[in-house]
Image (spheres, coloured by chain):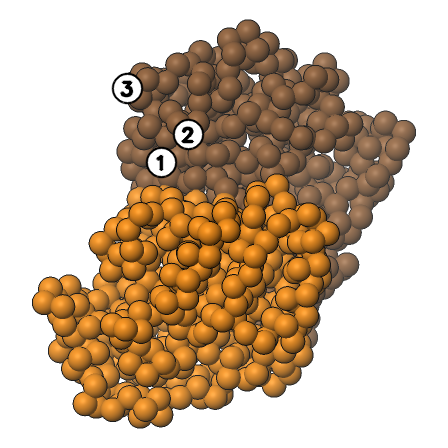
Chain colours: A brown, B orange
Amino acid sequence: MQNFQIQTPTNLVFGKGMQHQIGTLVKPLAKKVLLHYGGGTVKKLGLYDDTKKSLHAAGVDFVELGGVVPNPRLELVYEGIELCKKEGVDFILAIGGGSVIDSAKSIAVGMCCDGDVWDFFIDKAQVKKALPVATILTIPAAGSEMSQSAVITNEKEGRKHGMSSDLIRPVISIVNPEYFTNLPKSQLGNGVSDIISHIFERYFTNTKNCDITDGLCESVLKTVMKNALIAASDPKNYEAWSEIGLGGIIAHNNWLGIGRSQDWACHGMEHELSAYNDVAHGAGLAVLTPAWMKYVYKENINMFVQFAVNVMGVDSSFRDPDAIISEGIARLEEFYKKLGLPQKLSELSIPESAFEDMAKKATNAFFGDERGTGNFKRLMWQDVVEIYKLCK
Amino acid sequence: MQNFQIQTPTNLVFGKGMQHQIGTLVKPLAKKVLLHYGGGTVKKLGLYDDTKKSLHAAGVDFVELGGVVPNPRLELVYEGIELCKKEGVDFILAIGGGSVIDSAKSIAVGMCCDGDVWDFFIDKAQVKKALPVATILTIPAAGSEMSQSAVITNEKEGRKHGMSSDLIRPVISIVNPEYFTNLPKSQLGNGVSDIISHIFERYFTNTKNCDITDGLCESVLKTVMKNALIAASDPKNYEAWSEIGLGGIIAHNNWLGIGRSQDWACHGMEHELSAYNDVAHGAGLAVLTPAWMKYVYKENINMFVQFAVNVMGVDSSFRDPDAIISEGIARLEEFYKKLGLPQKLSELSIPESAFEDMAKKATNAFFGDERGTGNFKRLMWQDVVEIYKLCK
């Protein structure tokens, strides 16, 4: 186990009807709030009205900014910063999914720096300060409600990048799984794909002696996958959605990643798909993950045997580890299929002609300074092209 | 799953050599510190010197109070409060095991109230405020380094009680498993018994649909038990102690107990053993837990079958659940035995003549207001006597 440090101060408020507490919870922390959201969904769910009612009742002053889209845009972040400066906002409240929360976190950071907020996403600056952010979650997927990260798309440059800092963990997150029961099946698939990927990125490691976190990863993976299939056939099942929702939080608040080297190649490779063609993040991950596994598993056969047996339930002769691993990956592909997720880049309208540029961007070679991506096996741009080809 | 709220803001700093950071970490949070500890162990470990050196180097002003004993005493808490008031202390640093940390938390609460700090332990007062507490842990067991609870023994009244509040979670906890490799085997047994009991108290529940927390409990239980046996035969094994140390934190920071009813009967019944005869807490739990299981399992056969199969690895005919459960409990008893823990109250010098009084204290019947103990099966004083008899 490696030395580590973790601090997860988010006040997590979970369950039915909890959104009504938002005004009372925010009141002692804020003078003026930016209420940040996407489009019609929060209005259809009644969350937009509930939130405003709760803020009014608690006497919380606020301004609004809607319009966040999936793969949230830098342009709206700039607009948010300008609005918050003009209005004297000192607290951001995001209601919606991961995109809204990531946009809120970016505004929170942008409010506390003099330079360009994009610098934090391209490692040109380090977060030193941020306004506090609270969230009310409507989609379990990104885990942004308790995570130290945010991802933003810079449309002008065709780039999608993340920033990471303990300072952007939300101070309050309300998670009411009732909202999740209204999601279409595609959102279930995309969300669960993102959740299990957050665990995979931490699970697949060459760090030895990580029994506790190995076990935590495996148990949350199995539980989320089991309950995803329940929710797929019974979308109104509150209990199944509660398990997915809680699993999504734990998947990305980093308790599963402490003391071990983490990978993050699949996320890096996927961000290029989203940047190229506005692909749904979870759909891109479902295509890339099995291909990544096939390409890298020989780096650490034992780790992948453990995955196949402990997570995918493969029961076979241990004298043929390749067969066990192959069956484990096949079962994962079958799982994605059951959730209606794509299997090929062609289904996402990503042509082979785009592979080289995307691979070079994912490894930073495109910008003249190739860093590669991933830690389980360090991938250079040619490796990434091979992985794209495995699922073309 | 039940609605829940959780907030665990402790800055956890884990690994080799991390104690040297204490001065730097405390400096921005404290004007004057009480350095609180037990006896010779922290001096033998070099931790006492390392801590003072680090505080001096960071320019942190402090006073000292040693003398905490296992089952920490209320009298020393009073003494600590008096000293802190006299010296203008605004931050408590506990170096040692759970007893030192619980004593520190009690002083921290006592510093912020006008009345008697004992009132918080007998439900006469609710914690509204507490000084911040930091810890450097030397024994993995109590989980107090990240928990919201503290237990104190009132020697005059022969009572041992706990208080609970999010306000007493430490703000910083440094955990360096190197210290654990110096513990005698009895401390390994007592510590691990306490750790797995913290999980059992949360695990055994009648709340349905708790897949995520069921899985987390099971995986941490299995990992801690596996590594306890490694450390028993190889006491200098840093990696095994790291797993036990991390397991001990997660066992009691309450992430394993969210969204589910918790029990706590074994802890309640054990506190009476410690109050009666200064029994080591983990030893008392090892005696009581199997007896409690035998007495209550019929309340929820399915829960106990899950325990026997998923935690204790029993593989048998599911047409005979009683046999599966019986084998699961037998394996747990065998585990305690391997760690050198006692099996009977007589080994702890608790005579049968004491059972009725202890049972009445554990259920509050002694004080004319019988509340019972435990939630898995609510136990009244006669039930507790029966459980004591099962392990007399």
Q: In the rendered view, tell whether residue A229 sits above or below residue B333.
A: above
Can residue B130 be seen at all in this image of the molecule? yes
Real-space CA distance between mark 1 and mark 2, rounded to the nearest whole angstrom: 8 Å
Q: Quadrant of the N terminus of chain A?
A: bottom right
For the residue carrying disc 1, how many other residues have a C-alpha within 10 Å: few (<14), some (14-19), or many (20+)?
many
Residue extending farthest to the right is A368
Residue receiving disc 2 = A136
**What residue type is disc 3 on?**
Ala
Is label 1 in contact with label 3 (beta carbons under 8 Å)? no
For the residue carrying disc 3, how many other residues have a C-alpha within 10 Å: few (<14), some (14-19), or many (20+)?
few
User: Is B322 in front, or is B184?
Assistant: B184
**A261 left or right, relative to B370:** right
**What residue type is disc 1 on?**
Asn
Front of the two marks 1 and 3: 3
Residue receiving disc 3 = A57
Front of the two marks 2 and 3: 3
Residue, x 17% and y 68% (percent of image)?
B364
Real-space CA distance between mark 1 and mark 3, rounded to the nearest whole angstrom: 20 Å
**What residue type is disc 2 on?**
Ile
Real-space CA distance between mark 2 and mark 3, rounded to the nearest whole angstrom: 17 Å
For the residue carrying disc 2, how many other residues have a C-alpha within 10 Å: few (<14), some (14-19), or many (20+)?
many
Determine the secondary structure under disc 2.
strand
Label 1 resides on the chain identified as A
Residue B241: quadrant of the picture: bottom right
Residue receiving disc 1 = A176
Q: In the rendered view, tell whether residue A361 sits above or below residue A10.
A: above
Whole-percent x, y for residue B389 in the image: 21, 87
Whole-percent x, y for residue A253 in the image: 54, 44
Label 2 and label 3 in one chain:
yes
**A362 left or right, relative to B321:** right
Q: Going from the N terminus, do you reach mark 2 or mark 3 first?
A: 3
Determine the secondary structure under disc 3.
helix
